[in-house]
Amino acid sequence: MRIRAQRDDLADVLARANRAVGTRTALPVLQGLLCEVAGKTLKVTGTDLDVTVRTHAEVEVIEEGRAVIPGRLLSEAVRKMPSGMVTLGVSDNDIEIQGNGPRFTLRPLTVEDFPTQEEVAGEGVQVDGDALAEAINQVTVAASGDGARPILTGVLFETTDSGLRLVATDSYRLAKRELPGVGMEGTGLVPARGLRELPRTIGAPKVTAQLREREAVFTSERGSLRLRLIDGNFPKYQTLLPDTYPNEVVLDKDELLDALGRVSLVAEDHIPVRLKLMEGGVEVAVSRQDVGAETEHLAGDYKGVDEEVSIAFNPRYLGDGVSALSGEKVRIRVIDGYKPSVIDNGSDAEFLYLLMPVRV
């Protein structure tokens, strides 16, 4: 196997596939990238068995073949080459990477040990790639990073009468996004960690998606992303969403984010930020005995059955939800200081963020 390609083109395809390579694995071969050369195309595959990225690039093919090369070393070696053409090839038992002067020699991994995957059957459903990427970014902020609770590390994909719904929760917050008109059939729990890689690896204006029995598959002109589904039953999240909220306030999104940024100078994740909803807006306050306090008022439009309502939140969780909103406004709907509140932009019914209050 031997090819020549522009450094930047080669570095791009390797870096995207390398995002699926496991950093900690009992199988050394999974730290490698499978490089396959045929015709005028280089195909590169990286996987940790849960997440698989396959990308491709048009290159100058000198000799066809295939090899498994340590992913991080290969990607970094190509990236650090001088600008211009780079040659990558297998010579005897070595991998040679040569640019305009520098030359690396790496030891290959065993091709036969690299896991094989069948080709994806079926056409799937074509969706707007930008809308899908936005939806993924919005809901994955609420997914758990705790591997001890694998069900909460996933995003629920489920078919609705109007299209597709994405839901994630870590039991402290919940994010729900509707994608009307997307006729993706089936239900599956897709790992959030892998979904976050979609825009970075195969993101494109058009993406084809399908849910299979054991995996979710996304393809575009840039390659494919395959994610092994998580086994288990997702929490019955519908019961967390009340039908009505007696109190609400509408604020400027950027002003609230700026205020939360100032709050973070005093607070940490375990120090709640207090919001007092009242006529004219919201009072934002945080205090920490060993540091100090910060208080300010944000102008807003408040309406509700109560003259004022006080509620406290984890400041980072609140900031995550506000940042995920589209538009210039944020609406906070509250029942009281003890029940879940819902955050949205007040005009878009496609996305909402539910947040559990902190008892103080």
Image: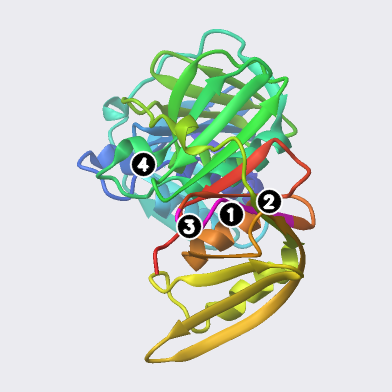
Q: CA distance from mark 1 to mark 3?
A: 35 Å
Distance between mark 4 and mark 3 Cα atoms: 13 Å
- The kind of residue tagged 4 is Gly
- Quadrant position of residue 160: top right
* First in sequence: mark 4 vs mark 2: 4
Assign a secondary structure to mark 2: loop
Could you say which is closer to the camera, residue 187 or residue 48?
A: 187
- Foreground mark, 4 or 1, reads 1
Q: Secondary structure at mark 3?
A: helix
Distance between the alpha carbons at the discs numbered 1 and 2: 7 Å
Report the Cα–Cα distance between label 2 and label 3.
Answer: 36 Å
Q: Which residue matches tag 3?
A: 76
Kind of residue sitting beneath label 2 = Leu
**Numbered tag placed on residue 32 in the rendering:** 4
Q: Residue at x 37, y 91 (%)?
A: 290
Q: Are marks 2 and 3 in contact (CB under 8 Å)?
A: no
